[in-house]
Image (cartoon, rainbow, N blue to C red):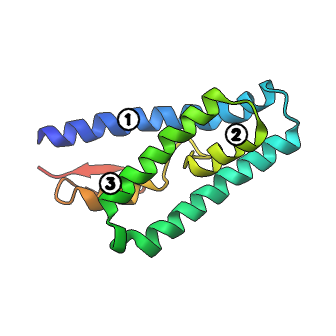
Amino acid sequence: MHRSVYLILFVKGLRTFAFGLVSVLTPIYLAMLGFSPMYVGVALFLVVLGNATSNLLLTWFGDVIGRRRLLLIFSFLTFISGILLYSSSLYPILALALFIGNISTTVLRLGLTNPLRLVCCPGLWVMGWVGSWVFTT
């Protein structure tokens, strides 16, 4: 296989592990900061709302802005979200970070970056079974 395929597999594995860990630890982190279950639930709703908004922006402006550029923008927003989550314990800032961060609510991380990776790297893989990767040589 091509070196790029191994690199993409490695990065996908790291991202899946990290996002799976974040999806489990986010409610626990908010509860440890002392927020009530209602605030934790609202924060998780903001995560889902942010993912839906990002997907809408992707479909509306994907061809105008460019998919690779959007992949960079959304990756940067995820980075900024992580910094905000680490550096603040104020609920409005945490809520904003969860909204812009494209944090997955599932361990599989079948979210915004999957279609972008598929479009940005044509010829390296094709989709196989649901959630499986079948690589071409």
Measured in 3D between alpha carbons, the distance from the residue under mark 2 to the one under mark 3, in whole angstroms, is 28 Å
1 vs 3, front mark: 3
Badge 2 amino acid: Leu
* Image mark for residue 94: 2
- Name which quarter of the figure residue 89 lies in: top right
Q: Is residue 54 above or below residue 96?
A: below
Q: Which residue is mark 1?
A: 13
The answer to whether one can see residue 45 in this image is yes
Q: Earlier in the sequence, mark 1 or mark 3?
A: 1
Residue occupying image coordinates x 61% and y 56%: 50
Expressed as whole percent of the image width and height from the top left, the position of residue 130 reads 42, 56
Expressed as whole percent of the image width and height from the top left, the position of residue 34 reads 85, 27
Q: Earlier in the sequence, mark 1 or mark 2?
A: 1
Expressed as whole percent of the image width and height from the top left, the position of residue 72 reads 36, 50
Quadrant for the N terminus in the image: top left
Q: Is residue 67 left or right of residue 97?
A: left
* Image mark for residue 2: none
1 vs 2, front mark: 2
Q: Is residue 137 above or below residue 88?
A: below
Residue occupying image coordinates x 26% and y 51%: 134
Measured in 3D between alpha carbons, the distance from the residue under mark 1 to the one under mark 3, in whole angstroms, is 14 Å
* Image mark for residue 117: 3
